[in-house]
Image (cartoon, rainbow, N blue to C red):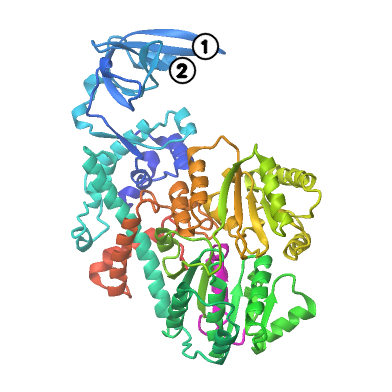
Amino acid sequence: MLDFLDQDIQYLTGVGPNRKALLVKELEIATYRDLIEYYPYKYVDRSKVYHINELSSDMPFVQVIARILSYEKFDMGFHRTRLVAHVSDGTGVADIVWFTGAKYIMDSYKVGTEYVIFGRPTVFNNRFQFAHPDLDKASELQLSQMGMQPYYITTERMKKARLTSHAIEKFTKTLLENKKDPFAETLPPFITKPLHLVSRDEALRKIHYPKTPEDMGNARYRLKFEELFYVQLNILRYASDQRRKYRGYIFNNVGAVFNEFYYNHLPFSLTNAQKRVIKEIRKDMGSGRQMNRLLQGDVGSGKTLVALMSMLIAIDNGYQACIMAPTEILAEQHLATLREFLGTMDVRVELLTGIVKGKQREAVLEGVVNGSVNILVGTHAVIEDTVQFLRLGFVVVDEQHRFGVAQRARLWNKSQNPPHVLVMTATPIPRTLAMTIYGDLDVSVIDELPPGRKPVVTLHKYDDAMTTLYNGIRQQINEGRQVYVVFPLIKESEKIDLKNLEEGYETLKAAFPEFRLSKVHGKMKPADKEEEMRRFVAGETQMLVATTVIEVGVNVPNASVMVILNAERFGLSQLHQLRGRVGRGADQSYCILVSKRKLSDVTRRRINIMCETNDGFRIAEADLKLRGPGDLEGTQQSGIAFDLKIADIARDGQLVQLARDEARKIVESDPLCVKNENKMLWQRLDALRKTNINWAAIS
């Protein structure tokens, strides 16, 4: 028998096939369940009635009870009419104005009848007026029982079809009236009682029709917790299954290779944060279970050195290591860095990318198969079927969000047991978001910069003061430094942006005729792009004019200035990543954010945060609050969709932690999902997996 909530929305009174088509297209509401889980975004107290003489223009939505005295029409030209109804409640006169539907309005709302008028009051010609308010017959509306009226987000197309928030409210009311028996519970009493959660039935009814703010708060808390709880239960059960299924290689030996590097080749003393992370990794590698660890750290914090020392432990235990980077530029950067760190040590490090061809490629592949290549550095080329390792024991995945789960899983198949995995990111991830995106990974954080690094000074300049900026750039180059100038490149307006970059390049060439410039953007042929990058890295050019292709993977210690044009078009995380390209040498470095003078409040806050702090985690938290999780760099590329209907990762951090703690108790006490008292939970989780919610494995 079809579940009540799985019924087709078109059969709900007042909907029908045409409205259903619009609801599906605009809001993805196809069933009763979709409708009941389409929650209001705000509420207005409908129990309070104002008199017209109590109104003021700064009030939000209010309601008055007034009688229609007369109608008046005004011709607006182009076959348009403005209809005005004059109304009075005995304390004063107000107007209601409509700009469409005059005939329908006059047929529906009669002169002499008293109506409850609900809307936002404004002043026009010294009289209060309501534009397109909600009207209900006063005799039919029991205001004392209305409580908080829900408001639902709708689209312009829906509004044109008279499918307004009010219409959705009526559909929801009809659905709740039709549902006589309680909604099925989805959380057991041993969770709901200690946490003082209201029942699911009460929550679903009162989220739409709360009598008081307390009702609304209790309903929202229950539904948010439930949503977050099942997300965390899904993540933790997956992680538990993986750990049980896959044993890890045991690397107990810290031997000659590691010690030679540590005592004779370490380029600088490790920070306390690096030491702590290496201890965490060593503990994982000796535990007998496969390591899956996320290593977070700002640009320049020393993640690559930690990764190398971890790979040397694998080599000491007779295994090979691999580091996978998202771009050829970053792979080559890693190769150069590792070889520089290792110096004369007898550790063979090779590169495998699309540009490694012919005999050179054959030699690398042969070395991987016979085990003479100790560390392979590459792009996605390393997961191709032609690449076969002798004994792959440790994998480093850099800039994790650029790779999908399936791509990384192919690396696992290149080894008898899954190799230990260290995922690195220079994009700091807020804790609440990390618990959701990377919830099955253990997290390590490098929160210190190596000694001698000076924080980058970030300044905000306006685009009408470029002369002063050019003078500062010239001074830096004359002192022997190099400069990045970054233009935005956003898909929706790629052609316009490319034109801006080309024109900007010519402008900069004219402004700095005494210097040599490089130019890099995503539309260039790879060989041309590589050559331009090489010239800048080698110091043959003094200025690199680029799009955000240089966001990851360019290490030029001599570059001391990052100029970001149209900074208002970048997100916080992206600005922070770009800023990380400078400040890599001993000299003071600068990041100049150039914008137009007219900025939105959100944009100005974003730029101010960049100027105030270099702390990537503080910036990431701010970015999460300003933009939401679905917009953050990395969450879209990774295939992790945030189909949360009511919870907010940015603002519900404590609830995320509570939900995770409760989910962990269940998984730890019932790892095989067999206990009778948890039957409801596992059945609900399986049902959620079959819906259109994105419950993809996150690892």
x, y percent for residue 606: 50, 46
Residue drawn 69% across the image and 86% down it: 367
Q: Is residue 401 magenta?
A: yes
Any part of residue 1 in sight: no
Separation of marks 1 and 2 at Cα, in angstroms: 9 Å
Q: Judge by depth and name the residue closer to the eye, 423 or 37.
A: 423
Q: Which residue is labeled 1 in the image?
A: 76
Q: Quadrant of residue 342?
A: bottom right
The quadrant in which the N terminus is found is bottom left
x, y percent for residue 24: 46, 42
Count numbered badges in the picture: 2
267 versus 568 height, above or below: below
x, y percent for residue 442: 42, 71
Crowd around label 2: few <14 · some 14–19 · many ≥20 (10 Å): some
Any part of residue 232 in sight: yes
Disc 2 residue type (three-letter): Phe
Q: Judge by depth and name the residue closer to the eye, 590 or 55.
A: 590
Q: Quadrant of residue 434?
A: bottom left
